[in-house]
Amino acid sequence: MPARVPRSRRIERAGGNALRALPQEHDQIVQEIDGGNDFGEDHFLPS
């Protein structure tokens, strides 16, 4: 049986993608934070 991505992981990635899309549509930089070192933070939006 092939390896499968858990549903929770797919939902997590979809949310991150949606969050990244809005600022990028307005030419803003979005820096993703490594999931192993995030302490609850997933993205950084520089000002």
Image: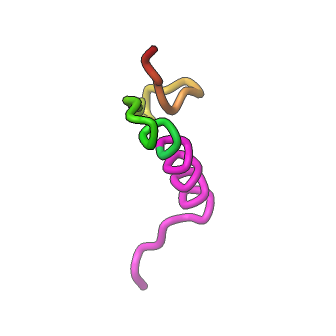
Q: Which residue is outermost to the bottom?
A: 1
Give the quadrant of the N terminus: bottom left
**Magenta stretch: dominant secondary structure:** helix
For the record, the magenta segment spans: 1-20
Identity of the residue drawn at 49% across and 66% down: 5
Quarter assignment of residue 6: bottom right
* In this picture, residue 30 sits left or right of residue 39: left
23 vs 8, left or right, is left
Image coords of residue 29 (percent x, y): 37, 29
What percent of the width, then of the height, locates residue 37?
44, 26
Task: Please provide percent x and percent y for residue 32.
Answer: 41, 33
Residue 9, x across and y down, in percent: 55, 56
Question: Which of the pair 34/29 is nearer the observer?
Answer: 29
Q: Is residue 21 above or below residue 35?
A: below
Q: Residue at x 55, y 42 (%)?
A: 19
Q: Quadrant of residue 24?
A: top left
**Going 59% across and 27% down the picture, which residue do you hit?**
40
Residue 5 position (above or below residue 16): below
